[in-house]
Amino acid sequence: MTDTTTATTWLTQEAYDRLQAEHAHLTGPGRLEITKRIDAARQEGDLKENGGYHAAKDEQGKMEARIRQLEQLLREAQVGQAPAAASGVVAPGTVVTATVNGSMKMRFLLGSREAAGTTDLDVYSEKSPIGSAILGKKKGDSASYHAPNGKELSVVVDDVEAYAG
């Protein structure tokens, strides 16, 4: 069975406009530029040994992947202010201060890195190990999660506030 639900990502108007401008550049001048580079490399002859051609094709593939990512993100985005933390509950769009493994203090935005824009905060997805462990928790609550290295870590939510990007 396949899960057909899609996650909504909140974006500030500034972040939405920035991503829309990036999409417009990639689908317009960006595509034109890469097409010209591919054509110029193709004119050089044998495509099997043409490093410039292969590099341009690789770049084109990455650019098309980013275009698809932006289209999905913009289509599913909820634009506006970050959701207010309901009575201090950890949710997407909140800034969390936490203590990990009893000693390491962290302060981060829970949500999309695209929403963060130019913030100095670290950004963790609500689907990340730490994000999913603390989602729905309140100040003072604790949880544990498995880090990417396989270790189980404890986390205590010290504070939750709405993101004011």
Image (cartoon, grey):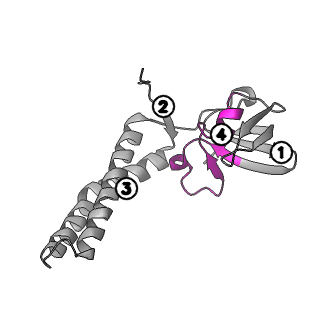
* Side (left or right) of 16 relative to 81: left
Dividing the picture into quadrants, the one containing residue 4 is top left
Separation (CA) of disc 4 from disc 2: 17 Å
Compared with 137, 15 (above or below) is below
Residue 37 visible in the current orientation: yes
Disc 3: CA contacts within 10 A as few (<14), some (14-19) or many (>=20):
some
C-alpha distance separating marks 3 and 4: 29 Å
The answer to if 17 sits in the magenta stretch is: no
1 or 2: tag closer to the N-terminus: 2
Q: Quadrant of residue 142?
A: top right
The residue to which callout 4 is attached is: 129
Magenta span: 108-136
Residue 116: percent from left, percent from top: 56, 50
Residue bearing mark 3: 22
User: What SS does tag 4 mark?
Assistant: helix
Location of residue 103 in the rendering, given as x and y in whole percent from the top left corner: 87, 49
